[in-house]
């Protein structure tokens, strides 16, 4: 991330939520200045953390028009693997997005480099997973048991649905990376697994080792989801 940056040239605005429209437009108006030409605006309607279809469309248009992507009030988006994967599709030798944030009661522009965001996101996911496992282990040591003893049947069904949603979200976040690997001529399941491990990308269960079967399951689920 770089501060003290003055954006210029063609820009496309991406607003992360319909709840953020007024505040986001005000930030853009205050923080961009007169050196940018805005050619389009995209507003995300989905509230799902790992599903950003409008962002994908905004990035496609940025590449078509050789424009920069402006995101006001970026918040925790850089912690989302789906978001970082999408930003990696921005073209250029050093692709980046422009974030407009309010600091010291003044709107300022910052550069977020796509490659740096992606690596920091992977590190954040690994650290969060490790912290969660330690917290659960500490609770279990006190005799705590997971689950809902009052209504176990309902809790089990809800847990299954939650796991399925998490698996679907992870598939949506990782399949763009697998597609990119395939574009570089790595088409066998083992070659894709090797490429994922070379990039230090964790599996859904936060493991370092990818297997051909694991890659196959992701591709099958992506086909089932139509992505």
Image (cartoon, rainbow, N blue to C red):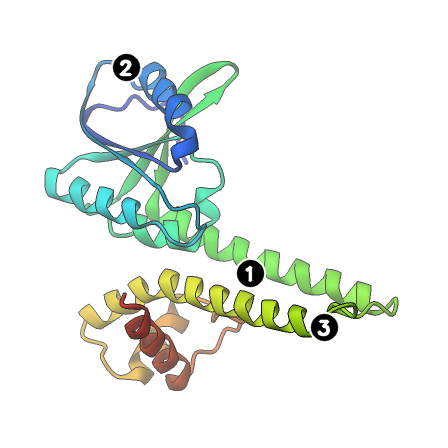
Helix, strand or loop at mark 2: loop
Residue 157 location, x and y as percent?
Answer: 60, 72
Assign the N terminus to one quadrant of the image: top left
Q: Is residue 110 above or below residue 134?
A: above
Residue assigned mark 2: 33
Measuring 43% from the left and 45% from the top, which residue is drawn there? Answer: 47
Decide if residue 73 is in sight here.
no
Q: Is residue 142 left or right of residue 222?
A: right
Residue assigned mark 1: 126
Residue 53: numbered disc: none
Helix, strand or loop at mark 3: helix
Q: Give whichever of 88, 24 is nearer the camera.
A: 24
Q: Residue furthest right?
A: 142
Measuring 41% from the left and 73% from the top, which residue is drawn there? Answer: 197
Residue assigned mark 3: 152
Earlier-in-chain disc, 3 versus 1: 1
Helix, strand or loop at mark 1: helix
Distance CA(mark 2)–CA(mark 1): 38 Å
Distance CA(mark 2)–CA(mark 3): 57 Å
Earlier-in-chain disc, 2 versus 1: 2
Q: Give whichever of 26, 79 is nearer the camera.
A: 26
């Amino acid at each position: 991330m770089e501060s003290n940056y003055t954006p210029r040239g063609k820009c496309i605005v991406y607003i992360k939520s319909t709840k953020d429209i007024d505040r986001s437009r005000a930030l853009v108006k205050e923080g961009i200045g007169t050196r940018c030409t805005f050619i389009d605006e995209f507003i995300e309607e989905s509230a799902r953390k790992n599903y950003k279809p409008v962002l994908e469309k905004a990035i496609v248009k940025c590449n078509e028009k050789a424009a920069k992507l402006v995101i006001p009030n970026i918040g925790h988006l850089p912690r989302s693997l789906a978001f970082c994967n999408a930003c990696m599709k921005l073209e250029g030798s050093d692709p980046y997005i422009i974030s407009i944030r309010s600091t010291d009661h003044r709107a300022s522009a910052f550069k977020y480099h796509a490659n740096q965001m992606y690596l920091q996101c992977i590190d954040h996911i690994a650290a969060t997973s490790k912290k969660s496992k330690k917290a659960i282990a500490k609770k279990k040591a006190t005799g705590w048991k997971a689950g809902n003893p009052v209504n176990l049947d309902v809790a089990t069904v809800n847990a299954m649905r939650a796991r399925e949603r998490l698996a679907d979200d992870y598939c949506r976040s990782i399949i763009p990376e697998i597609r990119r690997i395939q574009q570089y001529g790595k088409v066998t399941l083992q070659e894709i697994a090797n490429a994922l491990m070379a990039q230090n990308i964790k599996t859904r269960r936060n493991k370092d080792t990818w297997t051909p079967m694991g890659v196959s399951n992701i591709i099958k689920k992506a086909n089932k989801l139509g992505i």
